[in-house]
Amino acid sequence: MAQMQNGLKNILQKSPNDVVFLSALRTPVTRSYKGGLRNAYPEQMLAAVLRATVTQNPDVPPSAIQDVAVGTVLSELGGSKAARMALNHVGYPSSTSLYTVNRACASSLQAITTIADSIVVGRIDMGIGAGMESMTRNYGSKAVPTQLWPELKESLVKDARDCIMPMGITSEKVAERYRINRADQDAFGAASHSRASKAQKDGLFDKEIVPVSVTNPPGEGDDSPTPHSSETIEVTKDDGIRHNASTESMAKLKPVFKEIGTTTAGNSSQISDGAAAALMIRRSTANALGLSSSIIGKFAGATVVGVAPDEMGIGPAFAIPALLSSLELNKEDVSVWEINEAFASQALYCVRKLGLEKAMQEGRINPRGGAIALGHPLGATGGRMVSTILSEMGGGGLGEVGVVSMCVGTGMGMAGLIVRE
């Protein structure tokens, strides 16, 4: 117990070598194919958050930002060329380097982690961890390889074959194995929409969101005032929230992946478009540059674990204990939790396995809704969650210590710990 108390004390202390955040911004997250960003390119959304990062940090010259890591899952050529072009396009010099990262649903949390690691070991002093995804443009294969070594499809190793199992089927397996019933999944989904709806109406997302200008081609939309001309609009809000969602309306939806299954469009995350970026710096460097007052939080660490591919959704239930143990913390030390809602089945399993039912009842798990309501733009989700949890712990008054965690396709879980300042 004393060791755990020391762990919390150590986490809350400020050290010159801390990796801290100066900003954590995101675009709106909108519905793929139908939402406001459907005609945006992933690198266009990335450009918006990279530009806003400079605008919101006027005392940080772009030339001082040494490296940028961008999480993306579906982008052509791994997104590296388009992301680099976007970086230069919005005013960063060629001396600022960039690379992309793909850890499926945890890609932008991985990007944030790798930038933090580079700062910790002294490779850089300041960098950006970001993410981008247009599922509208790049989800044609449903995130399953179209050119795959045939031997893998017929592998004698079940876990190898299961790596390309549709995510919805993994949700059904979790629901069946761990007895997560349909009614509980529907109630969870409705609650996500309800919390997100209230947060949006109260303006709680406004400070973390960067507007994106998008040009729609001629003729899009029955109410277009100029049906024969392209139209440029500014997208400012998440548009996947069902403001009138209820458990009763969720119960009317049919299962999507199995005829007698429990996973529906209402209790699953939405496929979405969006981007995010977090500016990170060593605390001593921030102090030397006169940026101490701009620090909004600290990145305290992250952990990744592997689980069986056919139940990939249980990943957070194992990543979170590993993270807390590594930092000598227990779950009571955590004020707020952002656990990605890939599916209600797996999110509920994780909450129960971790013993977080009380935290859920108290509104400390996804207090502003999660991916069921807001959407899940694969490569950008981790960054979105980091920007939201920093906001929740700041103006939201939900304490100082937060955990961000998500399951990862092919069977992993990742978790990161954030301290608000």
Image (cartoon, rainbow, N blue to C red):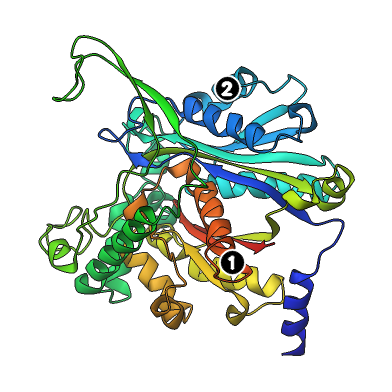
What x and y, as percent, mark residue 323?
64, 68
Mark number, residue 358: none
Q: Is residue 8 above or below residue 341?
A: below
In the foreground, 119 or 142:
119
Q: Position of residue 48 (x, y in %)?
A: 53, 30
Q: Is residue 165 left or right of residue 120?
A: left
Of all residues shown, which one is farthest toward the bottom? 1
Q: Is residue 142 above or below residue 158?
A: above
Instruction: Classify mark 2: helix, strand or loop.
Output: helix
Per the image, the residue denoted by label 2 is 86
Q: Quadrant of residue 394?
A: bottom right
In screen coordinates, is 39 left or right of 208?
Answer: left
Residue 284 position, x and y percent, is: 87, 51
Judged from this view, the residue extending furthest toward the right is 288
Which residue is located at x 49 percent, y 63 percent? 338
Please give the residue where the numbered disc 1 appears in the rendered image: 402
Give residue 336's position: percent from left, percent from top. Answer: 53, 70
Rounded to the nearest angstrom, the CA distance separating label 2 from label 1 is: 31 Å
Left or right: 143 in relation to 179: right
The quarter of the picture where the C terminus appears is: bottom right
Between residue 23 and residue 348, name the one nearer to us: 23
Instruction: Report the side of 1 relative to 254 (left or right).
Output: right
